[in-house]
Amino acid sequence: MSDFTLTELAEILVAIRVKLIRIFLIIAIAWSLSFFSISNAIIEKIKNDLLPEGANLIYKAPLEGMILKLKISLIIGFLFALPYIVYLTYKTLRDRTEILSNFHMSKSQAVIYGIVSAILFIMGLAYGYMLMLPIFLQFLYQSAKSQGVLAFYSLSEFVNFIVLMLAIFGIIFQMPLLMYILVKNGIARLETFKFYRRHFYVAFFTIGAIITPPDVFTQLMVGLPMILFFEISILVVRILT
């Protein structure tokens, strides 16, 4: 039994190593390609579209621009590897635990869920980039201007803030799909989401307090859209299930 256990453990470690190497290769290839091709274009696009007129960007360190490009490229690499990571996580939970014992998903359903997830994520990015962030950043700039302060933003801090907020909105827009999958497959009940509504509200504002600067307005800008989309998600799930 001891030899069998050690052999089984060795097989598991080899399988994990192979999968980790695949994930690393996906991230590394996408990272390198995006670093030399589109990272500069993304930074310039954000600067041209979202920097309030009158505000200025500065470097606070000599390597700030280079490090920012590396971060943007790494995020792109992770996004390319994310579908494979999700697949491995689902397969591991299904095969080695009972968490997803009641969850069954065909390949066609996986493709549909993937397409819907991508569409919702893009919608979240569009909402944040075209509607929320321009208003929010202009408000912050006008607030600084009214106090007689010149607005000089660090390039990396400005772009990192934009990317973080866009990621949050992209994740928020996944909420209807996630709740639908959970309810549809009997993993959770719609009544449970309703019953713990207030707990979700507290969690949303806690998340907003963690990921934003320590001011109430910014936290509300994150927390309130999450609450709104939570309620929309409940309505969508009620209609579709």
Image (cartoon, helix red, strand yellow):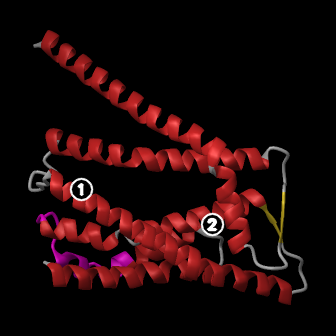
- In the rendered view, would you say 81 is above or below 170? above
Q: Which residue is mark 2?
A: 162
Image point 64% across, 84% down: which residue?
A: 135
Residue that extends furthest to the top in the rendered view of this protein: 3
- The vertical placement of 164 against 61, above or below, is below
Apparent side of residue 181 relative to residue 147 in the rendered image (left or right): left
Q: Is residue 199 inside the magenta stretch?
A: yes
Residue 70: x, y in percent? 65, 44
Amino acid on which disc 1 is placed: Val
Range of the magenta residues? 185-200
Which image quadrant: the N terminus?
top left
> Is the residue under label 2 in contact with that under label 1 (CB below 8 Å)?
no
- Numbered tag placed on residue 172 in the rendering: none
Residue 223 x/y as whole percent: 49, 79
From the image, which quarter does the C terminus lie in?
bottom left
Image check: 222 left or right of 115?
A: right
Relative image position of residue 115 (x, y in whole percent): 30, 62
The residue that label 1 is drawn on is 111
Q: Amino acid at mark 2?
A: Ile
Q: Could you classify mark 2 by the number of other residues whose Cα lies within 10 Å: few (under 14), some (14-19), or many (20 or more)?
A: some
What's the CA distance linking mark 1 and mark 2? 30 Å
The reply, left or right, for residue 208 in relation to residue 100 is right
Q: Is residue 51 visible?
A: yes
